[in-house]
Image (tube, rainbow, N blue to C red):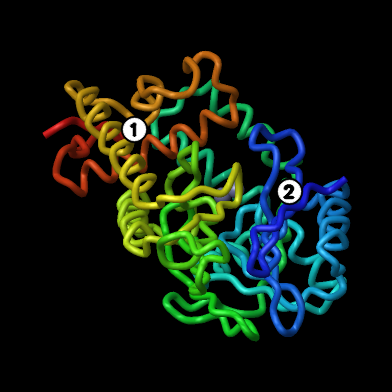
């Protein structure tokens, strides 16, 4: 049975399972409008997840075929995976921020072989050892990846603008960091139980009650711009904190209140992480060596292969931030690149 929860005021959520993932599920929100339900995110593209979403919509008194539109917080497959199927079944539009739509377009156009070559080169540049890089190099020619043909959205979410949902006031708040085109959606209507604050915020992966979202580099084989995703994320956190929503409706875990308090916790967490990282840089270290020495949810030796790639990306995002702040610098002429505190 689909787990459906009524949040009041014409908003419900459906727990759509993510197979083999410790997060468990994506919360897909169903927002009633005068033209039929609008979904915030859709869930992982898997037959069981699809079944749960369809069942959940029935439990909400509607059906997949009735969906009027789909608003996507960001392009990740646990959020955007089922969007194409929903559109096929209903004729709904799909809306996404342009920066994430660009990633969707690139993902559709890029051969997996090119991705592997790009990732291999990046890992070598970050100082990954040969035994880590070798399997990636060997896998490249014959591997196809899941989620390699995500649905191309047909509408653009424009930061600061209302989404034009019939009878509802839903405004897009651009919150880059977790992805370059991540958005939160502010339902600018009085809270149904009159909780103090300003409306409700669908926060995607940007603001979660008990975990910190992954902040890594924005991976783009065609773009060599030196971005600062952690800086983007910290700015975006302050932006949503200032909205002071009465309640936050995240895409994982559970609903919570007091967004500004959660924002303060996350800002403090990253500041602590940056300070800790800088103290490691008494000697020049590659991003890989930094990742090995940073604190994770388990010892480095127990971190599985794929998660190490994510960890290195996260280490690099923190290094970029330190460099931007003038607290560390790349050692001139080092290859692979090393960083040291200044
Ligand atoms: Zn995500
Ligand atoms: Zn997610």
Task: Report if residue 18 is visible in the image.
Answer: yes
Q: Which mark is residue 175?
A: none
Q: Position of residue 132 (x, y in %)?
A: 54, 24
- Residue at 36 percent across and 20 percent down: it is 293
State if disc 1 and disc 2 touch (CB < 8 Å).
no
Q: Residue 312 falls in which quadrant of the image? A: top left
Q: Is residue 227 visible?
A: no
Say whether residue 306 is left or right of residue 142: left
Return the residue at label 2: 15
Badge 1 is on which residue?
Answer: 336
- Nearer to me, 253 or 218: 253
Q: Is residue 9 left or right of residue 239?
A: right
Picture coordinates of residue 269, whole percent (x, y): 33, 35
Q: Secondary structure at mark 1?
A: loop
Q: Is mark 2 within 8 Å of ligand 2?
A: no
Residue at 84% from the left image edge and 75% from the top image edge: 66
Q: Does residue 35 appear to the left or right of 227 in the view shown? A: right
């Amino acid at each position: 049975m689909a787990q459906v929860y009524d949040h009041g005021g014409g908003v419900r959520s459906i727990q759509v399972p993510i197979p083999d993932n410790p997060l468990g599920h994506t919360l897909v929100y169903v927002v009633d409008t005068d033209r039929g339900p609008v979904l915030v995110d859709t869930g992982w593209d898997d037959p069981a997840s699809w079944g749960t979403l369809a069942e959940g919509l029935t439990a909400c008194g509607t059906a997949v075929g009735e969906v009027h539109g789909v608003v996507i917080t960001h392009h990740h497959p646990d959020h955007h995976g089922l969007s194409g199927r929903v559109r096929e079944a209903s004729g709904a539009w799909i809306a996404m921020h342009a920066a994430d739509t660009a990633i969707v377009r690139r993902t559709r156009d890029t051969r997996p072989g090119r991705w592997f070559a790009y990732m291999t080169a990046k890992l070598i540049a970050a100082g990954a050892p040969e035994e880590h890089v070798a399997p990636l190099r060997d896998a490249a020619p014959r591997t196809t990846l899941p989620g390699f043909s995500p649905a191309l959205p047909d509408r653009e979410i424009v930061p600061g603008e209302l989404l034009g949902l019939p009878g509802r006031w839903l405004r897009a708040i651009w919150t880059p960091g977790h992805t370059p085109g991540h958005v939160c959606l502010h339902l600018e209507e009085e809270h149904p139980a009159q909780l103090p604050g300003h409306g409700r915020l669908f926060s995607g992966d940007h603001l979660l009650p008990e975990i910190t979202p992954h902040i890594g580099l924005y991976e783009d084989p065609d773009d060599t711009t030196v971005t600062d995703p952690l800086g983007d994320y910290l700015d975006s956190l302050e932006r949503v904190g200032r909205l002071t929503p009465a309640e936050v409706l995240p895409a994982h875990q559970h609903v919570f209140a007091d967004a500004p308090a959660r924002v303060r916790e996350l800002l403090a967490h990253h500041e602590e992480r940056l300070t800790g990282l800088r103290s490691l840089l008494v000697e020049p270290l590659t991003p890989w060596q930094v990742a090995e020495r940073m604190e994770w949810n388990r010892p480095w030796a127990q971190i599985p292969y794929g998660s190490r790639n994510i960890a290195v990306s996260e280490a690099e995002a923190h290094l970029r931030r330190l460099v931007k702040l003038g607290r560390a610098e790349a050692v001139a002429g080092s290859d692979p690149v090393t960083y040291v505190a200044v």
